[in-house]
């Protein structure tokens, strides 16, 4: 399996705080059946996180450490881009990495300023030959209140990622229910761990894979944990299933009569 969303490199953003912690995270990932990890360090305009060539050097150094410690995990380059209003305008000037240098671009939205024009964002990124992957959509209040925001974005061409811990209910019942709704409606395409630590927010994958396989289907679990993640890492097309639009419950006779 490939984890396409993880903050495993040491001391480059708000993820792993030390080399030892990064090694512990890699060992956990290996036990979870993960063979490759795309490191998705935050690319944020307001924080001095490592980026560009400096980030690439950290990645190469850490891969050498993994080999020295005989940990059979490969870490690939990537960023989690923080969306701002002028991101697309200046996108050609920025030194970020797509997911393993593919067309797929992992995007995180401001938690207190969720954009109202998701479809326009998708269209504009696609015009620039990027395929937007919207990170951990289940965490946004706007999506929790109206999952059809994601429906429209998928129809426009977005790829939707949720966190493995969210599926398992480790981020709260509301977030778990949102994941359930999105999965049932074919609105989840890839799962990532979004791991930041070795003790909490860890790279847990196997439990979530088994949960989805048992509750929904093995084929669907294979798609969102294995097949589509591999496609992203290899810059291949993802076969996106048709999402189901929300259908409100029909009102009863008395409700229609009194227009309730």
Image (cartoon, rainbow, N blue to C red):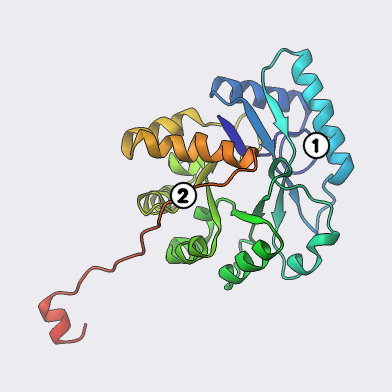
Q: Percent from the top left, x then y, of residue 12?
A: 80, 40
Specify the farthest residue to the bottom: 258
Of residues 83 and 97, the one drawn nearer to the viewer in this rendering: 97
- Tag 2–tag 1 contact (CB < 8 Å): no
**How many angstroms separate mark 2 from mark 1 (CA)?**
30 Å
Residue pictured at 58% horizontal, 26% vertical: 34
Q: Is 95 left, or right, of 164 in this rendering?
A: right
Q: Is 59 left, or right, of 203 in this rendering?
A: right
Q: Percent from the top left, x then y, of residue 197?
A: 65, 34
Of residues 69 and 166, the one drawn nearer to the viewer in this rendering: 69
Question: Is residue 164 placed above or below 66 in the rendered structure?
Answer: below
- Disc 2 target residue: 188
Q: Earlier in the sequence, mark 2 or mark 1?
A: 1
Residue pictured at 83% horizontal, 57% vertical: 94
Q: Percent from the top left, x then y, of residue 73?
A: 67, 23
Q: Quadrant of the N terminus?
A: top right
Residue pictured at 89% horizontal, 40% vertical: 54
């Amino acid at each position: 399996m490939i984890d396409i969303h993880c903050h495993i490199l040491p001391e480059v953003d708000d993820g792993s705080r030390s080399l030892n912690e990064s090694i512990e995270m890699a060992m956990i990932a290996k036990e979870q059946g993960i063979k490759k990890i795309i490191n998705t360090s935050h690319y944020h305009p307001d924080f001095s996180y490592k980026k560009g060539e400096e980030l690439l050097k950290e990645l190469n150094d850490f891969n050498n450490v993994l080999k020295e410690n005989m940990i059979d995990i490969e870490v690939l380059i990537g960023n989690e881009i923080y969306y701002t209003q002028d991101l697309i305008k200046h996108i050609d000037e920025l030194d970020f990495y797509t997911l393993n240098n593919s067309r797929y671009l992992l995007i995180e939205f401001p938690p207190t300023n969720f954009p109202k024009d998701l479809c326009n964002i998708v269209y504009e990124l696609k015009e620039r030959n990027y395929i937007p992957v919207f990170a951990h959509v289940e965490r946004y209040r706007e999506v929790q209140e109206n999952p059809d925001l994601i429906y429209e974005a998928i129809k426009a061409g977005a790829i939707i990622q949720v966190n493995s811990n969210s599926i398992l209910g480790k981020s709260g019942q509301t977030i778990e229910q949102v994941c359930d709704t999105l999965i049932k409606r074919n609105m989840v395409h890839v799962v990532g761990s979004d791991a930041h630590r070795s003790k909490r927010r860890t790279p847990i994958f196997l439990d979530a894979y088994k949960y989805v396989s048992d509750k929904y289907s093995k084929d669907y679990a294979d798609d969102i944990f294995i097949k589509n993640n591999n496609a992203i890492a290899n810059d291949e097309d993802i076969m996106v299933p048709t999402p189901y639009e929300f259908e409100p419950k029909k009102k009863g006779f008395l409700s229609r009569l009194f227009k309730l």
